[in-house]
Image: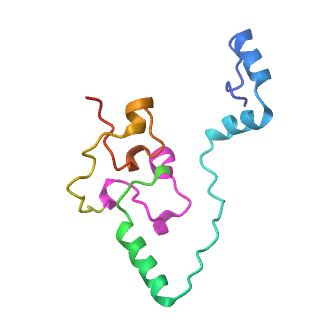
Amino acid sequence: MGIFDGKICNESQKRVSEQLPQNLINLLENYKKGPNVNIKLPKKNFNTKEERVFFKNLIANKQKTELCKNWTLYKDCYYKDTCSFAHGEKEMRTTITPIKYKTKICKAFAEKYYCNYGNRCHYSHKIR
């Protein structure tokens, strides 16, 4: 299977596929397979016991308050039950949002109609 599912419809698509770097072609071909979940991030080192407890409480308060991106896109997650994110609306916990949450317009979204933070942005993405 290639990036065109083994079918090249016309010569212009063939030329485009010949011009793409091989690493980009591999990325496009692997996109359908799902995320690379084998990447392990290094563990956080703590200086004190209090710092460790504070960090664990911080993480516990955020758990299951947002949908898992892998679950949303691929209906599968490497972490299964240990994932910090919710796998469906039934697992979602409600959080208390600040009063001024998303009351100001996001400057990046207003200029470029795109924000790197997406739905995690603390500013509004509504166009008035």
- Residue 76 is inside the magenta segment: yes
**Left or right of residue 80, residue 45 in this image:** right
Q: Which residue is drawn at the image coordinates 47% and 83% (left, top)?
A: 51
Q: Residue furthest bottom?
A: 49
**Residue 70's spot in the image, x, y percent?**
51, 51
Q: Residue furthest top?
A: 11
Q: Which residue is drawn at the image coordinates 51% and 46% (left, top)?
A: 74
Exactly how many numbered labels are in the figure?
0
**Residue 84's spot in the image, x, y percent?**
45, 65
Q: Residue furthest left?
A: 99
Q: What's drawn in magenta, residue-wise?
A: 70-92
Q: Which residue is drawn at the image coordinates 28% and 47% (left, top)?
A: 102
Q: Nearer the viewer, residue 35 or 111?
A: 111
**Residue 110's spot in the image, x, y percent?**
37, 32
- Residue 113 is inside the magenta segment: no
Q: With respect to residue 120, does 29 lie above or below?
A: above
Q: Quadrant of residue 112?
A: top left
Q: Nearer the viewer, residue 19 or 52?
A: 52
**Left or right of residue 2, residue 121 in this image:** left
Q: Nearer the viewer, residue 83 or 108?
A: 108
Q: Which residue is drawn at the image coordinates 46% and 67% (left, top)?
A: 81
**Residue 13's spot in the image, x, y percent?**
70, 15
**Left or right of residue 22, residue 65 in this image:** left
Picture quarter with the C terminus: top left
Q: Quadrant of residue 33?
A: top right
Picture quarter with the N terminus: top right
Q: With respect to residue 19, does 39 lie above or below?
A: below
